[in-house]
Structure formats: C-alpha cells, structure tokens
Image: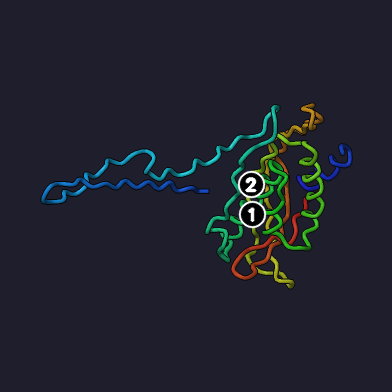
C-alpha cells in the first residue's frame, strides 16, 4: 500500500522589509566662530530593525499549520550521480510532506514531470483536504532508505529508485473543528520512482507503489 494510492482511496471515502531613517542636524552660533554641531547618540528610532520572521506553527486540533517553511533542494540533489539521485528522492518526499501540511502542491509539481500519474492522483486529494477551511495534522514522510541497483538509464533515459518510506499518522479536520478521520502511521511504504536528469536537475517522472 502506498502513500499515493492509500490517500486516493481515502478521499473517495471522505470527500517587507522597512527601513527607518532619522537625521539630526543643528548648529551653535558664536560671536566670532561657528562650532560644529554636537553629534547625537544613536537612537532606537534611527536604527534599522530587521522585520521579524513569522514563526512556524504546526497544525493542531485548534487549526491548520502556519508559516510552514518551503523545502529547499540541497546541492547534493542537483548532482547526476547515484548519491545525487538518492538525495533528490529525500527532497521530493519533503515537498510531498509540505503539500500534506499546507495543501500547496507547487514545490512537488515543480520537481515532477507532467506525466507523473501518482502525482496526478494525489493532487486533488490533498487540495480537497485544504479547501473550505479544512486541514490536516501530521502525514510527514521520511525516506528510510533507497536502493538503486544500477545507475544506468533505461531506453527512455530514466533511472529507477526503490525506496522505503515512513509516513506519520494523520488527522483530518473539518472547518468547524470536528475530527473527521484518522489514518495510522505507516512505516512500510515501498515506492518506485522513475526520474530523469534534465537541464542540470533531477525530475520525478512517476512514483508508484509496489504490490
């Protein structure tokens, strides 16, 4: 059972930085000479203060997650090598976790090919559970390990990776705050990803489950 197919079935069952400037000027007049104006000490009003970064707030029974950091692709995942592909797989699942937490499929789709059938199936499921005030708790995915038997492209130029993935338990909440459903943690998801290296970056062509 995979994260992609599991939640597709579940959905069927449920339907500025501002800079403050201050200047102080003055002069002292004398009978014969002009003295330089005293230098005013720095004041809080005259010091640029960086805008505070909004704090990340995970989802809870009180409401959806806020200010969720967008996953950033590591440099290792940009290398055309076996280790680079494994690093990309981990990053790809981070973007899927981000989608579960926020409903934003942008980062995931940006690293996936247009023909990714698994992506197409999970996209409406995730988006549905983040519409009209609904939200999810949990669901974070982590790659336990990945295996690449041979780092050689197939006839279509793609590489294959088999990964074991763990997904945290999830809770589905409706807009009124009612808990709709729970999904247990899954620690034995086996997924197969086909990926290609295009224009200096990996891209997931498809992700499907085994069995």
Which element carries disc 1, helix, strand or loop?
Answer: helix
Q: Describe residue 147's horizontal placement relative to residue 171 as left or right.
A: left
User: As drawn, is 145 to the left or to the right of 26?
Assistant: right
Horizontal and vertical percent for residue 12? Answer: 88, 42
Secondary structure beneath dot 2 equals strand
Above/below status of 192 relative to 128: below
Residue occupying the far bottom of the picture: 155
* Residue 143 numbered mark, or none: 2
User: Residue 88, percent across and down?
Assistant: 61, 56
- For this rendering, which residue is in front, 22 or 157? 22
The quadrant where residue 147 appears = bottom right
Judge whether 132 appears above or below 201 on screen: above
Q: Quadrant of the N terminus?
A: top right
* Residue 2 seen in this snapshot: no
Check disc 1 and report the residue beneath it.
89
Can residue 61 be seen at all in this image of the molecule?
Answer: yes
Image location of residue 113, percent across then percent down: 73, 62
Q: Earlier in the sequence, mark 1 or mark 2?
A: 1
């Amino acid at each position: 059972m995979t994260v992609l197919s599991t939640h597709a079935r579940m959905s069927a069952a449920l339907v500025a930085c501002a800079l403050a400037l201050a200047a102080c000027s003055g002069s002292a007049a004398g009978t014969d000479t002009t003295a330089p104006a005293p230098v005013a000490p720095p004041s809080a009003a005259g010091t640029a203060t960086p805008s505070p970064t909004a704090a990340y707030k995970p989802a809870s029974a009180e409401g959806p997650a806020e200010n969720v950091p967008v996953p950033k692709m590591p440099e290792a995942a940009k290398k055309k090598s076996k280790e680079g592909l494994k690093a990309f797989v981990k990053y790809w699942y981070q973007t899927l976790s981000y989608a579960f937490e926020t409903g934003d499929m942008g980062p995931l789709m940006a690293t996936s090919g247009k023909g990714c059938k698994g992506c197409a199936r999970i996209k409406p499921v995730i988006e549905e559970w983040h519409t009209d005030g609904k939200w999810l708790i949990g669901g974070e995915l982590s790659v336990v390990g990945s295996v690449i038997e041979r780092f050689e492209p197939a006839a279509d130029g793609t590489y294959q990776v088999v990964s074991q993935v763990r997904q945290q338990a999830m809770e589905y909440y409706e807009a009124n705050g009612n808990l709709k459903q729970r999904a247990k943690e899954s620690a034995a998801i086996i997924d197969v990803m086909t990926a290609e290296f295009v224009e200096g970056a990996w891209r997931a062509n498809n992700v499907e489950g085994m069995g």
